[in-house]
Each structure stands twice: as structure tokens, then as C-alpha cells.
Image (cartoon, rainbow, N blue to C red):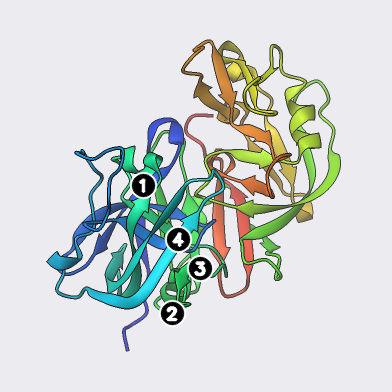
Amino acid sequence: MALKGDGSVTAEPLDNDQAYVTEVEFGSPAQKLKMILDTGSSDVWVQSSDSIYRVNENGPWAPRYLPKNSSTSTRVDKAFWGVEYLDGTTATGIVYRDTLRLGGLEMKHVAIESAQIMAPRFERETSVSGIMGLAKQLPNNITPPTPSFLSLLRSRLKKPVFTVDLRRNASSRFDFGYINESMAADNITWLDSNPDSPHWDIELELTAWRGKNPMWMYHKFQATVDTGTSLLFLPDPLASRYWEDVPGVQKSDLLSGVYKFPCEGSQDLPDLLFKLPTEHVIRIPGPYLNYGPLDTEPSLCWAGMQSAKDMAGTVLGDVMLKAVFVAFDVGKNRIGLANKILHDA
């Protein structure tokens, strides 16, 4: 039986921090692929030599998994998979088992979902080979049913925990098997994750911002902590109240309820605050809520915090996670949040 261990990986941001990409090794000898580590999904899928490119036929392509070049790769007979993400993008394909190495942790016989067909967005994104899901208890989309990657990873960790330290426009990191509490600027407050949800869901109640009306508002809501979502999506009453205080804010005509604002006001956006139990206040600096200029109108910027009105649920994505230190306790079904030292706020 393999010894249990721990490890760390760096994650590099793509443009506007739309995603963070980590180098993961597949196969023997190692093939280095660029993966998004996603706490909102559970599949480990990659572009590969099986991929059929319909819009990017001649490349360039992201680094791909080449099962025939791996001595430890075996095809899983009659197994297939298909995923669909919140934004409607999809991917489907076949399944292999192979060795995988993540931050010094080696796992054998991991189910690797090899993409045959995928959305055009994935074909064109040459910086991303695939997605590695770390959702709490969400089954993956393999038929026949196969244990999730997180369940396999957990069995290899000294402690069943991992932490995330995303940074704005800077190198970030994921730690597995231990919690480096020195990365938190204050105490870590632990919140139970909803035991009935397969996602990393927590409940928040009190929200405020430093603006014209810096008062705490009581609005209880459940939200998924999701490293694979770029933006922060809050309940509509909170999102609309926040943005109505911002001078020059507009709602998109083409996209229902999507906020944009004059970029010149980015530094004046009010900080967003969440009060946790024990009066612990988590702070998201106002400038972090700027997601960058519109391609068609560069004087306007997309809001990094949007309304979840037309979505299935509320999501605490990277816009928030860049400002906080997050610990995921797989063993105790809880999430820890802390402020951290920010070098640009």
C-alpha cells in the first residue's frame, strides 16, 4: 500500500484571472498537462490524441494526453463520459486508467476521461489541457459508475484536507494533505458544508459594503465555493443593492441582469464584507470586483460580482477566492475561511 503524503502545486492565472492552470503529470513517462483544478465539478478530463477538432482543426492545441505513449495506460472497455458546465459548454469521450502525479503525490489506476468531442471554447483555449474536479461528493459522469478523483486523492493524503490560495494576476497555489495556517492573516473560521449537498456548499447570512449605506443586511443564502468559476454570483437582492450605489453602473442589454460600470471608478468600488460566526469579517476589496474592460467599449468594465438571479445557485468563485484563504476539510465536511495579506489592495 502506498505511503500517505502531502504536496503543493502552483497555479498560474490566464488573462483577467478567468482561470488558474496547474501542471499535472499523466502517464509513464510523465506527460505534463495544463489543468484547471475545479472544486465545482468531479471529472478529470483531458484533450488527447482521441480528440476530434472541429473548429481548430490544425492547431495549435493545448498539451494533450497521448495514451499510446504511456506504458501504464489501459483503455477501459465500454466506458464513456459526458459533462456539461454552468456556462453550457460540453465535452464527451472515452476512458483510460493511468498513473497521475499531482504536486509530488502519485496515484495509480486513475480514471482519465479522454475527450473525443468538446465545445469550441475548449478547442481554442491552448493554455488549458483539461479540468480536474475536486467537488465534495459529486459523482463523476463516467458510465459505468467510477469512484471520483477526490475520493482517490483523499486516500493518499496524510490529512484529508486541501487549501487554496488564489492571487490576483499572480502565481497561486493549492496545498494537499496539510494546512499552512501562516498563510492566513487572521484566524480560520470553519463553516459546516451542507451534508445534503454533493457540492462544497456553505451558508452565509450577513453581508455589507463600505459605501453610502454601510449597514449589515440579513439575507441567508447557500453558496458553492467553486475554484472553477471566474466570477462571484450573489443573490439578486444583494447584487442589485450593491451596484445601485456605484456611479454610472449599467445593465447589459444583451445579457439579462449583467452589470457593467465605468472603469475609471474601479478604485472607488466599495469593499464587500461577509460576517461569519464569532464576528469574523471577511473582506473583498472593491477593486477586486472589476473583471476587466469590455472588448466593444473599453471605457466600461464588467462587474466581477453579478446577480445569481438566472442561475441554479449562488457561487463564490475566483473573484472572492482571490481575497481569502480557503481550506477544504474532506474528513469533517467543512470549509475554513480567513482573510490573507493582499499585496495589491
Residue wearing tag 2 = 155
Q: Nearer the viewer, mark 3 or mark 1?
A: 1
Helix or strand or loop: what does disc 1 sit on?
strand
Q: Nearer the viewer, mark 1 or mark 4?
A: 4
Helix or strand or loop: what does disc 4 sit on?
strand
Residue 317 is tagged as none
For marks 4 and 2, the one nearer the N-term is 4
Specify whether residue 188 is in view.
Answer: no
For marks 1 and 2, the one nearer the N-term is 1
For marks 1 and 4, the one nearer the N-term is 1
Residue 10 falls left or right of residue 326: left
For marks 3 and 4, the one nearer the N-term is 4
Above or below for 313 versus 233: below
For marks 3 and 2, the one nearer the N-term is 2
Which three-letter amino acid code belongs to the residue tagged 2? Ser
Q: Position of residue 125 (x, y in %)?
A: 33, 39
For marks 3 and 1, the one nearer the N-term is 1
Image quarter where the N terminus lies is: bottom left
Residue wearing tag 4 = 82
Q: Position of residue 337 (x, y in %)?
A: 62, 53
Residue wearing tag 3 = 161
Which three-letter amino acid code belongs to the residue tagged 1? Val
Q: Are marks 1 and 4 in contact (CB under 8 Å)?
A: no
Residue wearing tag 1 = 21
Helix or strand or loop: what does disc 2 sit on?
loop
Alpha carbon of mark 1 to alpha carbon of mark 4: how far? 22 Å
